Image (spheres, rainbow, N blue to C red):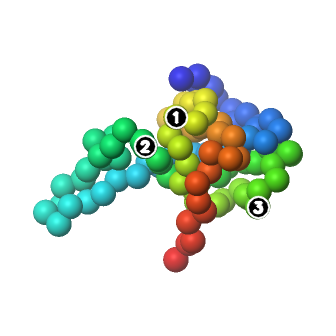
Amino acid sequence: MVEMEVLPKPYKNKVLVEVWGLEEVTKGGIIVPQLAKDKHRSTKGKIVDVGASCKLELKTGDVVVFEEWAGSRLYINGKDYLFVLEDAVQMVLEED
């Protein structure tokens, strides 16, 4: 993990995502993190910036699900970020 102070700009077909994680809450109120559920993990986050060569219709502010091990992790100002290829984004979640 790289530790920085300023958000870097994604290059070519990469997107910069603020990592939120996927977790499930059981009926009893127990939080089960994605890490404990399976080997093939996906995670959720918000797109912070999009590289100039991205061909998908991804934009800053989109909430997306992507492959957890798909990119380079950064730690900036106390938050987790990940550079991922646009093809690693599995879906864009609709906001309520």
Residue holding disc 1: 69
Residue 49 to residue 25: above or below: above
Q: Residue at x 34, y 53 (%)?
A: 23
x and y percentages locating residue 69 in the rendered image: 52, 34
- Mark number displayed over residue 41: 2
The image quadrant that residue 93 belongs to is bottom right
* Crowd around label 3: few <14 · some 14–19 · many ≥20 (10 Å): few
Give the SS element for disc 2: loop
Identity of the residue drawn at 61% across and 33% down:
71
Instruction: Tell me, yes or no, if residue 79 can be seen here.
Output: no
Q: Position of residue 2 (x, y in %)?
A: 58, 22
Instruction: Measuring from the top left, give residue 49's x and y in whole percent.
Output: 73, 48
Q: Label 3, secondary structure: give it.
A: loop
Residue 66 placement (x, y as % from top left): 55, 48
Q: CA distance from mark 1 to mark 2?
A: 8 Å
State the residue at coordinates (62%, 26%): 4
Q: Residue furthest left?
A: 28
Circle 1 SS class: loop
Earlier sequence position, callout 3 versus callout 2: 2
Q: Residues within 10 Å of mark 1 (few under 14, many from 20)?
A: some
The earlier-in-sequence mark between 1 and 2 is 2
Q: CA distance from mark 3 to mark 1?
A: 22 Å
Residue 6 shown left or right of residue 38 in the figure = right
Residue position for label 3: 57
Q: Residues within 10 Å of mark 2 (few under 14, many from 20)?
A: some
Residue contact at pointers 3 and 1, CB within 8 angstroms: no
19 horizontally vs 8: left or right: left
The reply to whether the C-beta atoms of the residues labelled 1 and 2 are less than 8 Å apart is yes
